[in-house]
Amino acid sequence: MLGACSTRARSTCGPSSWAEQLCGDGFKQQGVEECDDGNNMSNDGCDAMCVAECGGEVIVDDWNGWTYWKVPVMGAMTDTNIETACSDCGLDIPCAGPDNCSYNDEVCVQTNNEDSCGNPMQDMASLLCNDDAPSQCQDLWGIYQYMGHNWINDSGCGAEQNSWCSVGNNQVDRFTLCVTQ
């Protein structure tokens, strides 16, 4: 029994040793846990000790000074979950399009590699597969682009085989793009 401590405030009103006892409760304890996905299983993005398991791989190295990572996302492919996945790996989120794109926000970083606001990952598909359609570029299948919390109920926009801008709320446990410079 925790008494006056609320579930979300345990780390501020109890000993730090509670981290091991509470890892897996679904509430990330600031300064104690890197993540908490509601279970004590490893190899699902957040390990049994509540340490983030990035599991990312480089998909494009040095595209105009930016390295693009393919990073696993736990749960639905929403912008919120995409943002968490990049953050847990210590990576930034690339903006969906050029400056003034309605799908950019203060969270994403401008790489200036995508030149169309309504067509995220189009230039990357061209770079990787000599094709302008992400749905035809196998290297991008299962990857979802952050859309600035401004597209279909917080959904990311994804590339699936023969489907471009798949609605992220309809897909789970796929990948996102994150960047480093």
Image (cartoon, rainbow, N blue to C red):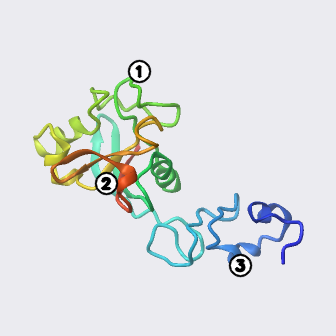
The reply to whether callout 3 and callout 2 are in contact (CB within 8 Å) is no
Q: Residue at x 39, y 44 (%)?
A: 179
For residue 21, above or below residue 51: below
For residue 31, above or below residue 38: above
Which residue type does callout 3 highlight? Answer: Gln
Q: Residues within 10 Å of mark 3 (few under 14, many from 20)?
A: few
Q: Quadrant of the C terminus?
A: top left
Q: Residues within 10 Å of mark 2 (few under 14, many from 20)?
A: some
Which residue type does callout 1 highlight? Answer: Asn
Mark with earlier residue (3, 2): 3
Residue hosting label 1: 100
Q: Residue at x 52, y 51 (%)?
A: 87
Point out the frontmost of discs 2 and 1. Answer: 1
- Circle 1 SS class: loop
For residue 61, above or below residue 38: above
Residue hosting label 3: 21
Q: Residue at x 34, y 30 (%)?
A: 97
Q: Residue at x 35, y 25 (%)?
A: 98
State the image coordinates of residue 110 (x, y, percent, origin top left): 41, 31
- Circle 3 SS class: helix
Residue hosting label 2: 58
Furthest residue toward right: 4
Q: CA gap, disc 3 to disc 2? A: 35 Å
For residue 25, above or below residue 152: below
In front of the other: 56 or 142: 142
State the image coordinates of residue 118 (x, y, percent, origin top left): 29, 30
Disc on res. 130: none
Q: CA gap, disc 3 to disc 1? A: 46 Å
- Circle 2 SS class: strand
